[in-house]
Structure formats: structure tokens, C-alpha cells
Amino acid sequence: MPPEETMPTPPDTPSSAPSYESMQQHRAREVMRHTRMDLKTACLLVLSILAVFYTLYFAASIILPMILALVVNLLLSAPMRFLHLKLKLPKPLAALILILGVFGVVGAIGTAISVPAAGWIERAPEAMNALGERLAFLRGPIHLLNTASERIENFMTIAGSHLDHATKAGGDDTAPIVMSAAPATGGLDNFGSSLLLGTRAFVGQFFTMILMLFFLLAQGDSLLRRFVEIMPTFADKRRTVQIAYQIERNVSLYLATITIINSLVGLANMLQCWLLGMPNPLLWGVMAFLLNYIPIIGPMMGITIYFLVGLFTFPSVLQATLPPAIYLCIHLTEGETITPMVLARRFTLNPVLVMGSLMFWDWLWGIGGAFLSVPLLAVFKIICDHVDILTPIGHIVGGPTRGTNTAPLFTPDMIDEDDSAPPGK
């Protein structure tokens, strides 16, 4: 097996991709063949992973802004290099220009949609009443469900009372304890205080992210250079540089590509809202742009919101289904055709693990974790591909090879007599 530092990087042309894939498979098999893990090592590994997750959960207020800053730094690495190397601007000045430019655009869009968003929030009670009238045809099925639920609850209550009588007859004199709920007082005050605390926490995390992003853009290269200098051997130095290069190249390419595609999705949805006569098309276009960063769940939420807005806007239910139907067509065109064609083999991840990563990070860090789920999974795969002991995990995380989705899982000719032979021999 060749040493780690001579392993090829993922090629750019699809014609040479199978050789790289077979090489990765061979490396994964070699690691699995020579790796043995006893019970003590497995227990220590599980405890270490649990300790990391425990730290990530309880230190989210400081770790999440730093991770967001790292991801945004990858997205801005190419513009930063252009400003510093091409225009000869000092790094601190280039970083400041980038931060002011990006967040100036974000602030302008947020200001433009804040007024219509506040208007929709104020009209929420009226909208709910209107939706109740439009969805009157569902009252029958809902009434049947409620009746069935009440019958099941009554049956469980009667069964529980019979069980209590049987218990008392058996000599159990323990009286049931009835807990009375205290009247809810100060609900509005509690809501206001929680909203104030949430706003303060968000502002603090946002300031932390901006500060961290500025220093990453201005001095991130020196930090990586110092880290490479302490590596003991040349192979370790080269491996570290390869990992950093692959993370910056692949993740920044993914983020830039997805941002452009999501912008087109937002523009298409804003255009269809304007053509159909829906109010505030800019608001719904920006919402579609943001939700498209969250795989699967984001577009589903967008379709639901478009349907509810359509019910409030249009006179009939049939007309209300038109905006979400067009939204679904746009999403299917983007997700099944445009995105795979643009990204090709540069960024392939297992769809099952993408969904699992989405649910896990959303549970751990909320909406910020949902936005970071795919980049974090990509970084994890790149690290696994360059560390020998983690190569099998990186191979599992990788996505399906193009053209092999319909192939059978096993055929007799797939099993070679000498499976340990390197690819190409």
C-alpha cells in the first residue's frame, strides 16, 4: 500500500473518477483488514464521543458562532484572495470590506422584508380565521378523529378506574394524589423576558461570529502555517496541507454553488409569486432562498407556507394549490437536475447520512445546526479520507457513484479470489 502522502486527490474529470474510487475502496479494505478493536478501546471511544457531544451541546453559545465564522470564512476565501493578491489590499482592510459588504447586503434585504413580515405577523389572528373558513371541508374528518380519540380516552379512563377498584380490593389503601395546577400568572411578563434574553443571546453570538470572522480572514493563513510547522515529519506536514486545501476547495465550492443555486430558486419563486398576484413576493422569495439551504425539510416547510399563504390570498382552494405546486416543480428541477449536474463528483455524500446529519445537528444546535449540517459532514468526510484509520468511515460517508444506483448489491462476479490486490493489478 502506498504511503498516505502519495495518494491522489479527487480528480476534476469524471473519466478518471472510477480509479480514484477503487483506490479509496482498497484503502478502506486494507484498514479494516488490519484494524482490531477490543472491548476496552470501543468503550473508551464511545465515552469520548459522548463527551464531545456533551460539550458541543452545553457550550453551543460559544462554539456555534465560531463554527459559523469558519464556514463563512470558507465561503469568502476566494474574494479575500482576490482583494489581497490581485488588488494588493492589506488583509485587515480586505477583511473589513468583505464583512461590511456581505452583511450590508444582508441587512438591506432584512430591512426590505421586515415590514411585510411584521404585517403578516400582525394579521396572524385574521389569517387563522380565514384559513378556518377555507378549510371547512376538513371539519368532518377532523370531527371523526376527535370522536375516535375521545372514545379511546374514555375507554382508558374506565379501564383505569376498574384497575383502581381491583387494587383497593387487594388491600392497597394508598390514596391517589391529585396535583392541582397553579393558575398561570405573569405569562406575558415571562414571554417578554424570555424574548429579551433570546435577543440578547442572539446579538452576543452574532458579535462573536463577526469578530471571529474578521480575525480568520485577516490572520487565518498564519494560524494554519504555525500548525503545519509543529508537525513532526514531512508526511504529516503534507497531509495537513492536503486536508486544509481539500476542505477549503470543496466546502467553499459547495457553499458558493449552493448559494448561487438558492438565489436562482429564490428569484424563480419571487417571480411566480409576482405573476400569480401573491402579496409581498420579495418576502416569499427570500424565504425560499433561505429554506433551500436546509435539505429536504426546508423545501417541505416552504411548500406548506406557500399553501397557507395561497389559502389566505386566493378565493378557492384549487387556486391556492398553484403556488406550492410551482414551488415543488422548481425544487424538483433544482434538486434532481441542476444541483447534481453542477456539483457532479466534486461533492458527493450519502443521502441517508445527510438526512441523519440534518436531524442530529438540528436537535443539537437548532436552526443554526441545520444550516451547518451538510458542510460539517463534508469536512468530516475530507478528514476521514486523509487519515488512514478513518478511511472506512470516509468511504461510507461518500455518496453513490454515478451510474451505479441501479446496480445489484451483490453478484458472484463481484467477489475476486484475491481481494487484497491493489486496483489496476
Image: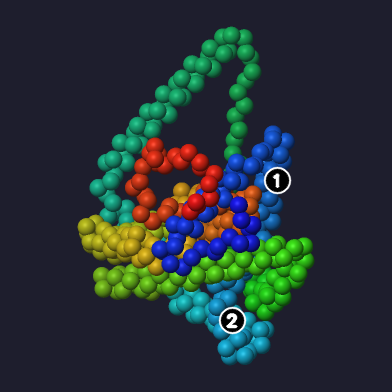
Residue of label 2: 81
Does residue 324 appear in the picture of this structure? Answer: no
- For marks 1 and 2, the one nearer the N-term is 1
* Tag count: 2
Looking at the picture, tell me which residue is in the foreground, 386 or 151. 386
Secondary structure, mark 2, is helix
Inspect the image, locate mark 2, and give the three-letter code of the amino acid beneath it.
Arg
Looking at the picture, the colour scheme in use is rainbow
- Whole-percent x, y for residue 131 in the image: 32, 56
Which label belongs to residue 71?
A: none
Disc 1 vs disc 2: which is toward the camera?
A: 2
Inspect the image, locate mark 1, and give the three-letter code of the amino acid beneath it.
Ser
Looking at the picture, tell me which residue is in the foreground, 171 or 67. 67
Report the Cα–Cα distance between label 1 and label 2: 38 Å
Q: Quadrant of residue 225?
A: bottom right
Instruction: Check disc 1: other Cα within 10 Å, few if <14, some if 14-19, many if 20+.
Output: few
144 versus 373 height, above or below: above
Looking at the picture, tell me which residue is in the foreground, 305 or 381. 381
The residue depicted at 54 percent of the width and 64 percent of the height is 9
Does residue 260 appear in the picture of this structure? Answer: yes
Most extreme residue toward the top, as rendered?
A: 170
Residue of label 1: 48
104 versus 387 height, above or below: below
The residue depicted at 42 percent of the width and 42 percent of the height is 414
Secondary structure, mark 1, is helix
Instruction: Check disc 2: other Cα within 10 Å, few if <14, some if 14-19, many if 20+.
Output: some
- Whole-percent x, y for residue 242 in the image: 62, 66
Most extreme residue toward the front, as rendered?
A: 425
